[in-house]
């Protein structure tokens, strides 16, 4: 599944510094827009988040180690996705 970034909230970099990325569709409430990357899904695929899968940003891919019980539902309905990066040196 591909998504297209629409806007990046003013506080996103601060969260990224803490290794967290929050995504929502463009209809997110205003209070979430400052902390989120707003995106539009480019397909209607569902249930795309799976342990062992990957999330890719540009040419950088990250393995999915855990998927919460409501993650696919929230991503499918709201475009909501919280990513916690575990970066190992």
Image: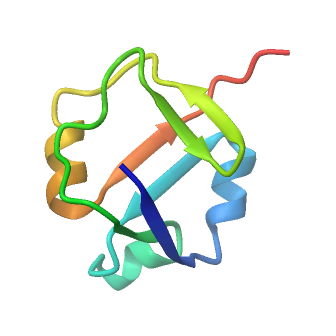
Question: Who's the residue at 64% across and 53% down the image?
Answer: 15
Residue at x-position 70% and y-position 39%: 60
The chosen color scheme is rainbow
As rendered, which of 85 and 35 lies closer to the eye?
A: 85
Residue 72 placement (x, y as % from top left)? 20, 40
Residue 33, image x, y percentages: 45, 77
Residue 25 location in percent, x, y?
32, 71
Q: Is residue 49 above or below residue 29?
A: above
Q: Position of residue 65 (x, y in %)?
A: 45, 16
Residue pictured at 16% horizontal, 45% vertical: 46
Residue 79 relative to residue 35: left or right: left
Quarter residue 63 falls in: top right
**Residue extending furthest right?**
89
Instruction: Give the quarter of the figure containing the C terminus.
Output: top right
- Is 10 positioned to the left or the right of 24 in the image? right
Q: Is residue 59 above or below residue 68?
A: below
């Amino acid at each position: 599944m591909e998504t297209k970034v629409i806007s990046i909230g003013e506080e996103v970099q601060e969260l990224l510094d803490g290794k967290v990325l929050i995504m929502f569709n463009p209809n997110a409430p205003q209070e979430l827009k400052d902390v989120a990357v707003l995106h539009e899904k480019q397909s209607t695929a569902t249930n795309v988040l799976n342990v062992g899968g990957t999330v890719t940003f540009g040419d950088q891919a990250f393995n999915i180690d855990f998927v919460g019980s409501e993650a696919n539902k929230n991503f499918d309905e709201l475009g909501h996705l919280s990513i916690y990066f575990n970066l190992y040196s």
